[in-house]
Amino acid sequence: MSNLFKIFDVSGSALSAQSVRLNAIASNMANAQVASQTPEGAYRAKHPVFATVLQAAGQSGSATPVRVVSVLESQAEPLAEYAPNHPLANEQGYIFKPNVSVVEEMANMISASRSYQNNVEVMNTTKQLLLRTLQLGQS
């Protein structure tokens, strides 16, 4: 029975992690077309890094919660675009945009959204199992 309650911990931590992932994706997409005058000032895409939380020794095979270890900034070079009439153009006529692929971010958003939905479904199914177990004891 206690293992059923651990499912809530694991799914809850996964929901939290996917929420961080969705927020990072939304930030990346919102800033995908933001121009800068210098490469250093260009927006850098953010990507969360996940890890499992290690449980006490002796619990081999048990499910472990997930957590966000860090949110890394992309090291990809910004895209230089020749736009001499742009108000942020440098002396050579270039502006710098983030190297963010909106198509990749959309694919990541779909993946994160489905993972979030799956974990909600796991929690709902576990809740139903617990309720049915309690109803068995009343019969």
Image: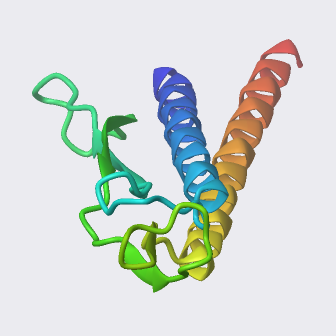
Left-right relation of 37 to 101: left
What residue lies at 66% left-to-right and 55% top-to-bottom?
30
Name the residue nearer the viewer: 125 or 121: 121
The x, y position of residue 97, in whole percent, is: 48, 69
Above or below for 139 versus 91: above
What residue lies at 42% left-to-right and 58% top-to-bottom?
45
Q: Quadrant of residue 5?
A: top right
Left-right relation of 43 to 107: left
Q: Quadrant of residue 25?
A: bottom right
What residue lies at 57% left-to-right and 31% top-to-bottom?
12
Name the residue nearer the viewer: 52 or 24: 24
The x, y position of residue 84, in whole percent, is: 53, 80
Q: How many marks?
A: 0
Q: Residue furthest bottom?
A: 82
What residue lies at 24% left-to-right and 63% top-to-bottom?
75
Q: Residue furthest right?
A: 139
Q: Residue furthest left?
A: 57
The x, y position of residue 29, in whole percent, is: 63, 61
The x, y position of residue 111, in whole percent, is: 60, 67
Image quadrant occupied by the C terminus: top right
Name the residue nearer the viewer: 70 or 111: 70
Above or below for 6 versus 38: above
Above or below for 96 versus 55: below
The colour scheme used to paint the residues is: rainbow
Name the residue nearer the viewer: 105 or 19: 105
Left-right relation of 58 to 112: left
Q: Residue furthest top?
A: 138
